[in-house]
Amino acid sequence: MDSDQDLVIESTADGSHTLFVPAMNEHYHSVNGARQESEHIFIKTAFDFCTKSQINILEIGFGTGLNAYLTVLSARDQSKHVNYTSLELYPLSQTVTDKLNYADKDSTNDKVLFQKLHSLDWNIKCEVTAYFSLTKIHTDFTKLDWKIDQLYDIIYFDAFAPDKQPDMWNQSVFDYLYANTAPGGILTTYCAKGVVRRMMQQSGYRVERLPGPPGKREMLRAVKH
């Protein structure tokens, strides 16, 4: 990917921002509503679905920090303790993240929280709130050699689309993720392609198609037996 100076900030249907990557002809989030997409796919369908009070979460693609931010808020609201690990090869600059409006309609404290997620150091575990710790790892996920120190109860799989980043969507990837998913653990993604569903199933996940967010008919949720 080119420098994030080439990224274009765009408003989506729910008023929240997404980033457009001209070199890939791809958006970070749905143009039909960035915040509501993340809330539907990762919070409602994964975080809310998990019954544990102590949760290890792995995110593939930190990106704009939107998924992490919504999880911070949900962890606080539900009194769940979250250990959140996010993998990202192309961290965004503060010049870009300072312009994102995800917290604009929230409280001042929540705006500070969003900024804190981006300002924290990489590759070390940091406490964000009493309910949420974050480890941002600057790594190439596809090498499948990033450090694993626990099994994950939830995996947010938020890579760019398979036709844009095919190396992120292959059998080795899903086998590796399955091996590092806790029993009963959940993986969700916006992608509902049949080939992706079949790879998840071959890894051992039980996979279901669920209604997608606005503008998308279906999504996938995979659960480890």
Image (spheres, rainbow, N blue to C red):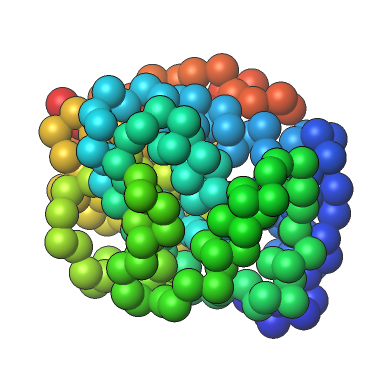
Residue 19 placement (x, y as % from top left): 75, 59
Horizontal placement of 174 versus 98: left or right? left
Q: Quadrant of the C terminus?
A: top left
Q: Name the one closer to the observer, 79 or 154.
A: 79
Residue 2 placement (x, y as % from top left): 68, 80
- Can residue 156 be seen here? yes
Vertically, is 87 above or below 130? below
Horizontal placement of 27 versus 92: left or right? right
The residue at the point 38 percent across, 71 percent down is 137
Q: Quadrant of residue 216?
A: top right
Q: Name the one closer to the observer, 185 or 126.
A: 126
The residue at the point 77 percent across, 41 percent down is 105
Q: Name the one closer to the observer, 122 or 128.
A: 128
Horizontal placement of 155 versus 181: left or right? right
Q: Name the one closer to the observer, 155 or 206.
A: 155
Residue 174 placement (x, y as % from top left): 29, 48
Q: Quadrant of the N terminus?
A: bottom right
Vertically, is 6 above or below 135? below
The residue at the point 77 percent across, 48 percent down is 104
- Can residue 158 be seen here? no
Residue 31 placement (x, y as % from top left): 78, 41
Count of all numbered marks drawn on residues in the image: 0
The residue at the point 84 percent across, 35 percent down is 13
